[in-house]
Amino acid sequence: MKEVTVSTSQYLDYRRFVSWSTVDFQNMQAAIIKEHAPHQFTSHNSLGLYPSINLFDQAKELDVMAWDAYPSVDEDYLNMAKCHDLIRATKQDNFWMLEQKNGYFNYSDYNLAITPGLVRAWGLFDISRGANGVVYYRYRSNRWGQEQNPNGILRHDGSKRRAYFEIQQMNKELAPISEKLGKTNVQTEVALIHSYDEIWSAMAKKQYSNFDCHKLEDDFYKVLIAKGITPDLIDPEADLSRYKVVIAPNLILLSHKTADNLKRFVAGGGAVVFHVRCGQKDTANVMVDIPWPGIVRDLTGITVDEFEVFPPPADHVYNKIFFNGKEYPVRWWADVLSLNTAQAAAVYTERFYKGTTAITENTVGKGKAVYFGAAGCHELMSDYLDKLFKEFGVPVIKVPDRVYITTRYSPEVSYTFILNMGTEPQEFNPGIEGTDILTGKKIAGTIHLEPLEILIVEKK
């Protein structure tokens, strides 16, 4: 099929209009409910990372934000965790799960049977990352219409499925702490900027087959999860005062309001990590006519002189970077940087730009602006963030694959959820002490987790 030429600016405006009109219609309905039933709270079941609606806008007029989770049995749950962290951040508050899967998919290429213990684990996973209510789709399996698979807590004949007993078990386990737990919330010192303008701009025109905005965000997100950090996924113009480090994987489109927000944050003592392609376009999806990274050039203290986008396959090494006594592979993208006021933190070791800067740090006020000029460098990203987090006082825990750790806080008590969502036993030291409310055991030092084993560690 022949490629159709489109106006990238008009496409972006169309996506904004679709989102705005949808949110406006929702808000009109919410206003009617408030007028006639002011005692009722309003919510809406969003779809997590669904790209067509700006969830930050959608959440504004709702009392409680919510979403629907339909995870695969064989996934690593990174996507599910990321959705939780986005929905929670839309209102900086706890949320609801209005549809949590408990059976089979109605629409899928395959359907694996639900592993014993997994329905309970999904519910506790929701709660660990900020859900204050978990509603399952559905109570009894549907016999009619488009969704007739056995995805109910009860079968089509009304008999109880295994899911019924796992949900019952979870309710009994949480009953002793439910009131206190409901008054806690997730607090984090690290945020990822999640920009819908970036998503829509990328939808308007995909320039390179080996590069997309979702991969950039996912790469940083995976690193944070492996360090035991539960980040907020925030709007570019959000209040940043609660964070120590803000990571901006995608800021190709950069508004003056966002730039000023980040400048204030850095000047006040925070650290911002900018990434490749930053500041190349304005809010109309038009390339800027000033040197890159555009309107944050002074904040970053660098100029982007050239760049390379490497061809597939994405796992091939095309260059290397030297950082802190070690060489790291570059697989997707390389920005060639020159220094203005910034200092070099890492340099390239191959190709014609060998010895030029790949990562920079610029001190501004009490904080620091970092430009991370390469993509497809997962190992380097992890090691560099270790250095940055240590400098800015963000604690890090080395967490095994498919193990998730999140803490919910109140002034009186905290609950740290440690979930092994994998199929293999794991051992590690979470660096916490307290009492597991599920077993009554004291937790300290190294712990052992069987597959789908969960701890809820209470600390007063």
Image: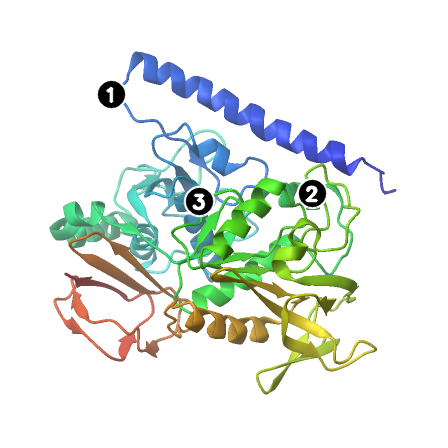
The 10 Å Cα crowd at callout 3, few under 14, some 14 to 19, many 20 or more, is: few
Q: Relative to residue 323, is residue 441 depicted above or below?
A: above
Q: Is residue 208 visible?
A: yes
The 10 Å Cα crowd at callout 2, few under 14, some 14 to 19, many 20 or more, is: many
The 10 Å Cα crowd at callout 1, few under 14, some 14 to 19, many 20 or more, is: few
Q: Amino acid at mark 1?
A: His
- Viewer-side residue, 275 vs 24: 275
Q: How far across and down, in percent of the image, does residue 370 sit?
A: 58, 64
Point out which mark residue 121 bears: none
Distance in Å between CA atoms under marks 3 and 2: 24 Å
Query: Element under label 1?
Result: loop
Of the two numbered discs 3 and 1 in the rendering, the one whose residue sits closer to the viewer = 3
- Viewer-side residue, 251 vs 88: 251
Determine whether, in the image, residue 225 is placed left or right of residue 169. right
Determine whether, in the image, residue 184 is placed left or right of residue 17. left
Query: Element under label 3?
Result: loop
Q: Which residue is mark 3?
A: 239
Q: Which residue is mark 1?
A: 39
Work out which quarter of the rendered image holds the C terminus and state it. Answer: bottom left
Q: Which residue occupies the extreme top position in the image?
A: 36
Query: Element under label 2?
Result: helix
Q: Amino acid at mark 2?
A: Ser
Give the mark, 1 or 2, whose residue is nearer the N terminus: 1
Q: Which residue occupies the extreme bottom position in the image?
A: 325
Number of marks present in the image shown: 3
* Residue at x 20% of width, y 71% of height: 433
Work out which quarter of the rendered image holds the N terminus and state it. Answer: top right
